[in-house]
Image (cartoon, coloured by chain):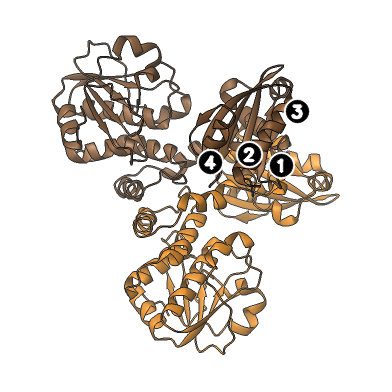
Chain colours: A orange, B brown
Amino acid sequence: MKIDYDAAAKMLKECDNAYILIHQSPDGDCIGSGTAIYYILKSMGKKAKVICSDDIPKRYDYMREDYKDEDFEPEFIIAADVADINLLGKYKDIYGDKVDLCIDHHISNSMYAKNTLVDPDASAACEVLFEVMCAMGVTPDDKLTKCIYTGIATDTGCFKYENTTARCHEIAAELKRGSSVNFALLNRALFETKSRGRLKMECLAVENTEFYLDGRCTMIVVTKELLEKMNVEPAELEGIAGIPLQFEGAEVGVTIKQRDEQSFKISMRSANSANVSDICASLGGGGHVKAAGCLLYGTLDEVKEIVINAVKKGIGA
Amino acid sequence: MKIDYDAAAKMLKECDNAYILIHQSPDGDCIGSGTAIYYILKSMGKKAKVICSDDIPKRYDYMREDYKDEDFEPEFIIAADVADINLLGKYKDIYGDKVDLCIDHHISNSMYAKNTLVDPDASAACEVLFEVMCAMGVTPDDKLTKCIYTGIATDTGCFKYENTTARCHEIAAELKRGSSVNFALLNRALFETKSRGRLKMECLAVENTEFYLDGRCTMIVVTKELLEKMNVEPAELEGIAGIPLQFEGAEVGVTIKQRDEQSFKISMRSANSANVSDICASLGGGGHVKAAGCLLYGTLDEVKEIVINAVKKGIGA
């Protein structure tokens, strides 16, 4: 059942204790919203516990300084930023059909919970939770401010992406007026620093970028050989598909990842007007308008030619 | 004389026509505020002209689509985002002592104008101008929105830096509510794309970064040899001093630029608590707490050792 802010606020106030589920491969928004719910429940004297199928990355520890795990049997199950039970990982079978309240912002939410508060126009689950806090009369302290800000900032690429609403700027302003958090330091850690391995990987990707169609199509080919040369953990390859679009003038960024001698995984990103969902569909794949993919077979040269021709047609070059 | 928003608003309303001076090496904030003043004056039927000692970079053309140069003798001279007449470049001698109204946000403003509206707490000159627009009763159209947003976004690193006030988030929200501008596209052009030369330069800098004091001090040495290898315009070296701080754990980022065989220019940046102004002062230089520099003589190895020892002492490593 779909519910509104007031109903969600009432449930948080009335539950006795709760497990708070967040999605696997946890990011700033699910950790932020999940941890914020934990702090809200704790401040009301309730028991609470955040549960995730994967480890919480150390870089988000600053949100969890006052978090303590405790053992109890939950009477209420909450899911934060979880669009579907498949994102619960190893907890899917245990809690998938037992979620009492889901707080989310994904338009794709599969409505698996008994009660779902979802606002697809919100930039982040943390934006939705902020409105619930307003309905509850909770004034964010520094702990809550760090959580809510982190979710909004990470999901919007620090107020850069299309989902950056006027409302999320207003919430950032409210959080800043009411706290002594060092936001610049937080932003530096979240957006301006990277591991050595990650920076090296990005540089190798930039150096190996190929330019087609007058630079309107940029391409990175990650062969097995290059992957060995990069010498990075698979996790550090995350987001590599965005790198070819960093070049001025690029309209479609293509990443070709070698699977074996004659098969390649293609990822495409669009900078603006190009519809890469259509382009990938013409190659037997699919996805979203600005991010799509497909699988191609042949030699690398054959695959490249197929891709470039499809992009050429797609952007009318 | 220091004036307030209302007085500045009155002057813009009452002047017959104006030259609008912006600073040399123009950036998003001076182009944004200068061009916005132009549009405001034009909308009131006045003549106006933006004047800059250097060319306006093409990447900011989107703000100037409705800008047209016209010839006239000015009765009023305005300076936007110009802290001192030395920043007027070749126009210093012609207009330096003739500025009627200065709109600025630099604490260092030298009060050279007959009337100065300066708010050192504002993130950008565009933030100050937005308040003047409010005092004038001007509602920003899409043209003005692009200008004001660009100034605030570029001067705050897209809402990342310390100068990102609650107020500038509120202004961003107001601009977004009232316009049909594609802010995500604008942000992409301003913050997510770079020239090939720039990306190559950054990669070479990353690859050549040296790590000292357990990675707390990171260093790039730009020898004449490396500079030739980089093969970039001097303008593309701008901001290189920020690169060593991209590495996780770096507290002080040092850039050593070779001037000749035995002399080196040192730039230091602090990630957070390190006071590089003090460190550079101990080496005969100076600057700000988070960005400072000095000049050292000797062989490269001698200079490096001097720098590392000073940083070690400065951060208590």
> What residue do we see at 35% from left, 68% from top?
A139
Residue type at numbered disc 2: Val
Discs 1, 4: same chain: yes
Find the distance from the CA under tag 4 to the CA under tag 3: 24 Å
Find the distance from the CA under tag 1 to the CA under tag 2: 10 Å
> What residue do we see at 82% from left, 44% from top?
A229
Give coordinates of residue B145: x percent, y percent: 32, 39
Residue pointed to by mark 4: B275
Circle 1 Cα neighbour tier, 10 Å, few/some/many (<14 / 14–19 / ≥20)? some
Residue pointed to by mark 1: B212
Label annotation for residue B301 = 3
Residue type at numbered disc 3: Asp
Label annotation for residue B311 = 2
Compare marks 1 and 4 and give the one earlier in the sequence: 1
Dot 2 falls on which chain? B
Check the picture and name the quadrant holding the N terminus of chain A: bottom left
